[in-house]
Amino acid sequence: MSPKAGELLVQEIAPRIRSLAHSLTPIGCEDREELAHDATAIAAKLLLSTEARAKKVTPGNIAYYAVGLVRQGRRSTGQSKTDPMHPAAQLNGRSHMLSLDASFGNEADGEEMTCLHEVLACRSEDPAMAATRRLDWEQLGTSLDMTTREVLRCLLEGRALTSLVPTMKRSSSALGADKRRLAALVREHLGDDILRQVQEQPRWRDNVEANREKMACRYERQPA
């Protein structure tokens, strides 16, 4: 951009854009001051284009078209009507934003309120956590002898330790000692709080259940 065009942008076009900022509609977290800066950036691109083609324009025309493009949903970074996060797609009515805390259901009819994040959340285990746990258990498995490994397999299968008495040729008290030794090894390799970690549920599930209990208590307090 030439110095003359730059001075025209700063001295005449930018003030006109700021005076028209009240007509701009912010989308999402945008504000009018941000949109005015975006329109100024678009005006700079328009000036570069007209200057390259040696076309004469007035500051009023550049400001008018720049503000008009921003009002239509164009931004200095581009325009997309297929991206649901882009203002152009939302202004076109092809998408709209919803809070993840938005509730579904009719409380008046006694229906259970369900939040959007509960509907979209995956209930399966986090693959990253599963992979990390697998690595931890592989390291632990290398330090186990045959007896404690059989005790661990028995516990994983949900069988009673007494089922190992015939095959391992060990008494129930000896197997109990092996179980306690296994617990000590698990705490040594995975930490003292490993039992609490494997039993606790994700934090977002705590919020879901708390909301459910609150709605249930509110429903029970309603007059018959």
Image: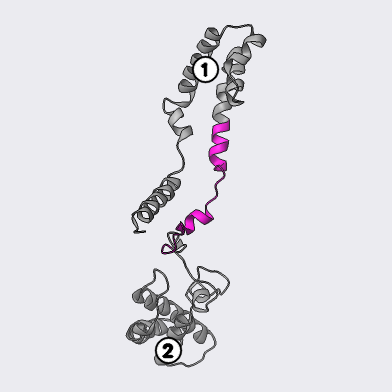
Q: Residue at x 62, y 26 (%)?
A: 157
Label 1 vs label 2: CA separation?
76 Å
Q: Residue at x 58, y 32 (%)?
A: 134
Dot label at residue 64: 2
Please tell me in which quadrant of the rendered image residue 63 appears.
bottom left
Image spot of residue 182 (x, y percent): 52, 17
Front position among marks 1 and 2: 1
Mark 1 lies on a secondary structure that is helix
Dot label at residue 59: none
The numbered mark, 1 or 2, whose residue comes first in the sequence reads 2
Q: Quadrant of the N terminus?
A: bottom left
Query: Start and end of the magenta stretch?
Result: 107-134
Neighbourhood count class around disc 2 (C-alpha, 10 Å): few under 14, some 14–19, many 20 upward = some
Image spot of residue 5 (x, y percent): 42, 84
Dot label at residue 182: 1
Q: Residue furthest front?
A: 224
- Which three-letter amino acid code belongs to the residue tagged 2? Tyr
Front-lying residue, 209 or 37: 209
Q: Residue at x 53, y 56 (%)?
A: 120
In this picture, is 176 found above or below 115? Answer: above
Q: Is residue 165 magenta?
A: no
